[in-house]
Amino acid sequence: MNKKELIESIAGAADISKAAAEKALNGTLAAIAESLNKGDKVTLVGFGTFSVSKRDARQGRNPQTGKTIEIPAKQVVKFKAGSKLSEAVN
């Protein structure tokens, strides 16, 4: 499912226009991104938890040349599925 299909699904389920569904989805995604940017967790009970974790700098190899390269530290987003989502999938 892509974003357009998700918007159509939201609009149908909530009985609202596609434009309103798109605004709601974009607002939700922006709020999640903003919270994660601040370092906060976002928990949607039953669905899952989004969090940010730090990945340390490390050494890697260029597969073409075999040379060692430095991979810088960075923040990565993690998602842990909630119990209801896990049950729905299984």
Image (cartoon, rainbow, N blue to C red):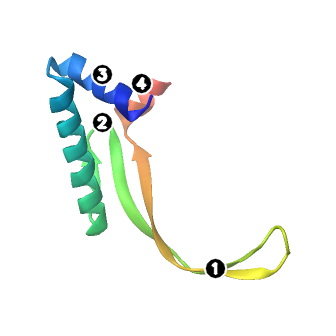
Tell me the residue at 30%/66% (across/down). Answer: 37
Residue at mark 4 to residue at mark 2: CA–CA distance: 10 Å
Identity of the amino acid at label 3? Ser
Give yes or no for contact between labels 1 and 2 (Cβ–Cβ under 8 Å): no
Residue at mark 3 to residue at mark 1: CA–CA distance: 42 Å
Q: Which residue, given by chain and number where applicable, does mark 4 sit on?
A: 88
Q: Kindly report which numbered mark, 1 or 4, lies closer to the viewer in this rendering.
A: 1
Of residues 48 and 28, which is closer to you in this image?
28
Tell me if mark 4 has few (under 14), some (14-19) or many (20+) residues whose alpha carbon lies within 10 angstroms of its own. Answer: few
**Which image quarter is the N terminus in?**
top left
Tell me if mark 3 has few (under 14), some (14-19) or many (20+) residues whose alpha carbon lies within 10 angstroms of its own. Answer: some
Q: Kindly indicate the quadrant of the structure image that contains residue 75.
A: bottom left
Q: In the rendering, at what x and y percent does residue 64 appear?
A: 84, 68
Q: Which residue, given by chain and number where applicable, does mark 3 sit on?
A: 9
Give yes or no for contact between labels 2 and 3 (Cβ–Cβ under 8 Å): no
Identity of the amino acid at label 4? Ala
Identity of the amino acid at label 2? Gly
Q: Which residue, given by chain and number where applicable, does mark 2 sit on?
A: 46
Of residues 17 and 83, which is closer to you in this image?
17
Identity of the amino acid at label 1? Arg
* Label located before the other in sequence (2 or 3): 3
Give yes or no for contact between labels 3 and 4 (Cβ–Cβ under 8 Å): no
Vertical placement of residue 75 versus 17, above or below: below
Residue at mark 3 to residue at mark 4: CA–CA distance: 17 Å
* Label located before the other in sequence (1 or 2): 2
* Label located before the other in sequence (1 or 4): 1
